[in-house]
Structure formats: structure tokens, C-alpha cells
Image (tube, helix red, strand yellow):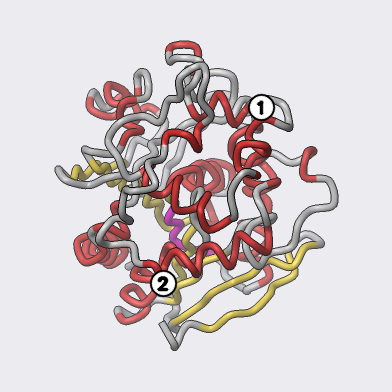
Amino acid sequence: MENIQHKHVEVRGLKLHVAEIGSGPKAVVFLHGFPEIWYTWRHQLVSVASKGYRAIAIDFRGYGLSEQPAEPENDSFIDLVHDVVALLDSLAIDKAFLVGKDFGALPAYLVAALHPERVSGVITLGIPFMLPGPSAVQNHLLPEGFYISRWQEPVGRAEADFGRFDVKTVIRNIYILFSRSEIPIAAADQEIMDLFDPATPLPPWFSEEDLSVYASLYEKSGFRYPLRVPYRTLKVDCGLTDPKVSAPSLLIVGEKDYVLKFPGIEDYIRTGAVKHFVPDLEITYMAEGNHFVHEQFPEQINQLIVSFLDKHGI
């Protein structure tokens, strides 16, 4: 960890925070989800670099140590796609492997679909290929208290819910909720933060020190942008019709990840329907894996990632 270098890189008028280790000729760019940040890839950065790769993790715009756009409410997933390509340009990287977790999987796949010449391969954790748009997540098939539905409501409700607690408590609550195998759903008289039991300890693979790092970074950025991207922009059509990802790809699925219980997701993956969009896709299941499988089982995930990179990095 101490060998990870930090800097800010000018990307489309914003300074993005970049964590980097390793100096190999082949680059691997890690894209976080929520409530994560560059630090979520701490195990993978060191492992990939030790195998001869240039490992890079960013804080997306509006997250952590990266700058906020002037008008976050105008942003969508396509801004993240453009940022990744511009980042590669700024770092003089012609082609890279992209590794995405949670919502970070969406720009990873979209960069590969729109700019295939820039992508050597794609690895995603938990989230298969999906397009932002009205049918990305079928909220209408879940109760009103579904956390994504609540966080997609117009500005105010989620902000008030989060605002009852300090940032560290919000991150703790979400991490514990998202570590479970059940979809977070609040009752009509509850908010999402009310689902958390203060007596519940952190998962054994996530320390108080880890929580403090996350909290310090979100204390800087707040939750304004995360509530916009991914949540309030998830339904915004990105204007693509039947895109294809031609790059070799790997989807790692924790079988105790609550996302598998989203309507249609498990069938979409297990039947192979996802391969309509990602024909060269390998799918690996981890029986005990949850939503944070890369932090829960870092050694196994590191091995899967490095094996994929070595296979396709020729």
C-alpha cells in the first residue's frame, strides 16, 4: 500500500484523483462502485502490479479526491465513459484492461463497446453488461422501498436520510446492508438508513481502519454526485442501440450478492443471454461471494484477475 503513488490528472476540465502502482507496459484501470472509492481496489492494485502490470485506480468525478463538476445534475454515465477515454489519453495509454465493480461495470463495458481499439479486455464484478435506460433495473417489479427507487427520488429524500448521520456512519450502514444476500428494501414508514442495526459489526474483511479511509474520502466529496451518478441517472437512455463488446471479458459473480435477486438478473447471466452483448464472455461463480467479493476474498479474486490478464495480455 505504501508504494501506491497518488496524483491528480487533468481530464476534460476536471482534476481526477489517480492511485497508481507498477510500471509494466500493459495497463489495468480499476473503476469503483458505490459506496466505494479508489481504496476498494487496494488488494488488487498491489497484486496486479507485482505481476508486471501498471495498475491504476481512479476516483470518478465527484467522488473522493476528484473534483466535482460545476453542474452535477447535468451528468450521466456517458460522462464517465468520456472521462475514462480522456484519462487514457492523458496518461499516454493506447490500450488498457478495464476492471469495473458495481456501477463501475457500466462505463467499463461502454468504453469497450464505443472504443474497442482502446480496450484489451474487460473484467466486471457482480454486474453483467447493461445499458443505462428505463429498463436497466426493473424497479416496478420490486416494492416501493427498494433502495434504488428511494435514491432515485427527486433531490431531498435520500439527502435527508443520509443527513441524519455523519458520513462514517452512512458508509458503515451501506457497507453492512450491501454485504447481505437480501436486497435492501425499506417499509413504507422507514428510510433506507433505518434498515441498519447499530449492533451489527463490520464484516471481518472490512476493518475500522478501512472504514475510516472511506469516510475521510466521502467527507471531502459528499453524496451529491453519487446520488446523481449512478442512481438518478441510471434511467437515462444513453442513446445506444444493440451495442457489442468484442473484447475478451470476464464476469465474476458472488452467489450471495443481493444483485442476483434483482428481477431477471440471474436468468440473464445463467442462461447466457448476456453473451448477446458480450460474445467473448467467461463467467465465474463464487459460492460464498457477496457484493464486495474483491474485498471479501482478495486472494482468489487477484488470482482470477491476473490469470485473465496473462491470458489476454499477449
> Which amino acid is tagged 2?
Glu
Which residue is at a point 26% across and 64% down the rendered structure image?
A: 298
Which residue occupies the extreme bottom position in the image? 3
For label 1, the crowd category at 10 Å Cα-Cα, with few meaning under 14, some 14 to 19 and many 20 or more, is some
**Residue hosting label 2:** 209
> Is 158 left or right of 119, judged from the image as shown?
right
Classify 10 Å Cα crowding around label 2: few (below 14), some (14-19), many (20 and above): few
Q: Which mark is residue 122?
A: none
- Give the CA separation, mark 1 to mark 2: 36 Å
Pair 1/2: label in front: 2
Q: Earlier in the sequence, mark 1 or mark 2?
A: 2
Q: Residue 109 in the image: x percent, y percent? A: 48, 43
Mark sitting on residue 236: 1
Asked if residue 66 is positioned above or below residue 227 in the image, the reply reads below
Residue 145 vs residue 109, the one in the foreground: 145
Q: Give the magenta range.
A: 95-100
Residue at figure coordinates x 64%, y 62% from the top left = 219
17 is higher (above) or lower (below) than 72: below
Which amino acid is tagged 1? Val
Seen at 51% across and 41% down, the residue is 106
In the displayed structure image, the side of residue 44 where residue 231 appears, left or right: right
Instruction: Tally the marks.
Output: 2
Quadrant location of residue 83?
A: bottom right
Question: Are discs 1 and 2 less than 8 Å apart at CB?
Answer: no
